[in-house]
Structure formats: C-alpha cells, structure tokens
Image (cartoon, rainbow, N blue to C red):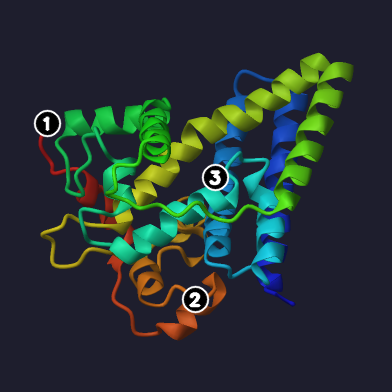
Amino acid sequence: MKVHWRSVVALFVEATVAWSTAALAVWLWHPLWTPLLCVVIATRQHALFILYHDAVHGLIAKPQRLNDAFINAFVGVPQSLPIHLYRALHLVHHRTLGSELDPERVLLYAGQDWDYRPLPARPLIRQLAGDLLLVNNLLTLFLYMRERIWPTGRLKLPKGRIYPEYYVLAGLFWTAFVAFAWSFPALALKGFIVWFVPLLTLTQAIQKVRSFAEHAALDAPEWSYSWEPGLFGRLVLWPYNIQYHREHHERPGIPWDELPAAFPDRVARPGKTLPRLMWDGTF
C-alpha cells in the first residue's frame, strides 16, 4: 500500500474550506454574503476536481481500490461524479489527444460554439452563458448517455471498474443528508442550495474556461498548452499545478507536487494572455 499524503492533506484542507464556507453561507443567509461565499465554494470545488484528476491517474494511493475510495469520499460522492465514470473518458482523451476521436471534442464541446480557437464576442458570451447555466453540461451528459446506451463506435469508452466502497460512501452521504433534512428541513434546503447551485453553475464554468486554456485546434502548432499564472490564477483557475498541462500529457504518472521539479525548463504562456486565447477581439 502506498499513499501520496500531500494529496490526501490537500483534499482534507480543500474539503474543510469548502464545507466550512457552505456552513457559513447557510448560517449568514444574506443576499450579499451568501452569493459571495458561493463563489468561494465554487473555486474550492474546482480545486477538489483538480486533485480528483490526479486520482483518475491513480496518483493518490496504491492500489487503485484505495485510491478510488479516498477520492470518492472527498469528491466523487459529495460532488456527484464517481471516479470510474470520468476515468473512462479521461484516459481515452489521453490516448486520442489531438485527434477527432478525443472525447473532449466528441462530447464536451459537441453542438457548442467553442472550436479551440478565439471566438468573436457574441458566440463567446453564448458559450460561457451555456456553461454557467448548465445548458452545455446537460448536452454533454445527453451525448455521453447516448454513447453508453447506443455506442456509435467512435469513442470505444471502457466501462471502468467500480468498487463496492462507492455504494457504501454514497449511501452514507445521502442517508445522512436525508436524516438531516428530516430533522432540519429549512437548513438542509439552504445547504443543498449553497453546495449544488455553485457546483452546477460557476464550478462548471470555471472548469470549462480552464479546458479552453488547455487544448488547441487540430491545425495549431501545438495541441496542448501550459501556463504561468499569477496568484489569483493559481487560486481559481490553475490550482495544484494543473497549469503544467502539456507536461502532464507527456508524463501523466507524475503527481501534481512533483511537476515543477520534473520540468524546470518548460515554456509556458503568461496567465494574463488567456483572454486573447478565448476572444478574437471582434464583436
């Protein structure tokens, strides 16, 4: 057995901050402070998803069963994305990066304005609004479920192994929530709102903007970008060295905290140039 303790500590810290902020948002329940606290919650949910990404590659613990139990407890269950589902997509993404069979191209952006190129203002606003308001994620979910039920043969998605611990963790989480809701319905409703509304809106939009920044059009000179963000970028968009994206594709077996030492001479885009990658300057 092997545990990457820096990741486990990071998971614990991020989850504590996220849930404590949610509790504070419920306790205050103020028209100004609660929405602002929900923004903080969304950024920490995104940070948890970045650590989750390391777990997809089995970098949190060995064996994989322990790895999956850790990440489902901290992220997969409370953020409603069991790791075996995303692993099936993400590992295919690594194998097909830069091709038309990449699941991100086939599922994540299908039917949307984004085409891995800077967009004019109007379609960019439409794209971001669709990400923020859950429209695009529902479309992606529909395409994913359709691919699972009636496979087209384009993606050949593996089923992914699910361990029984996931059902135990999910059962405990939702049983505790239902019991709490039975005893304190008003507080439970507020808690549900401050956790799941950010998760389904702003967290998804943050993830999508980061995804915009990571990959390029098929005819671009490079199809994966790395970034050098400032403090704000590291806190919100690129936590836990996810800005080492091209390097991660080169060596996906390196944990987040070891990437800087493994690639000391990397070439990266300044974080402030991100708007130019998204908007072509026209209206």
> Where does label 1 land, which residue?
283
**Label 2 vs label 1, nearer the camera:** 2
Q: State how many labels appear.
A: 3
The answer to which of 14 and 165 lies nearer the viewer is: 165
Tell me the residue at 58%/70% (across/down): 59
Does dot 2 land on a helix, a strand or a loop? loop
* Relative side of 78 to 186, left or right: left
In the rendered image, the vertical position of residue 253 relative to residue 70, given as above or below: below
Does dot 1 land on a helix, a strand or a loop? loop
The answer to which of 234 and 157 lies nearer the viewer is: 157
Q: CA distance from mark 1 to mark 3?
A: 29 Å
Tell me the residue at 19%/67% (across/down): 222
Q: Earlier in the sequence, mark 1 or mark 3?
A: 3
Image quarter of residue 79: top right
**Mark 3: amino acid:** Thr
Q: Which mark is residue 43?
A: 3
> Where does label 2 land, which residue?
253
Are the residues at dot 2 and dot 1 in contact (C-beta closer than 8 Å)? Answer: no
* Relative side of 64 to 245, left or right: right
Q: Position of residue 225 (x, y in %)?
A: 28, 64
Q: CA distance from mark 2 to mark 1?
A: 42 Å
Are the residues at dot 3 and dot 2 in contact (C-beta closer than 8 Å)? Answer: no
Tell me the residue at 43%/46% (across/down): 207
Q: Earlier in the sequence, mark 3 or mark 2?
A: 3
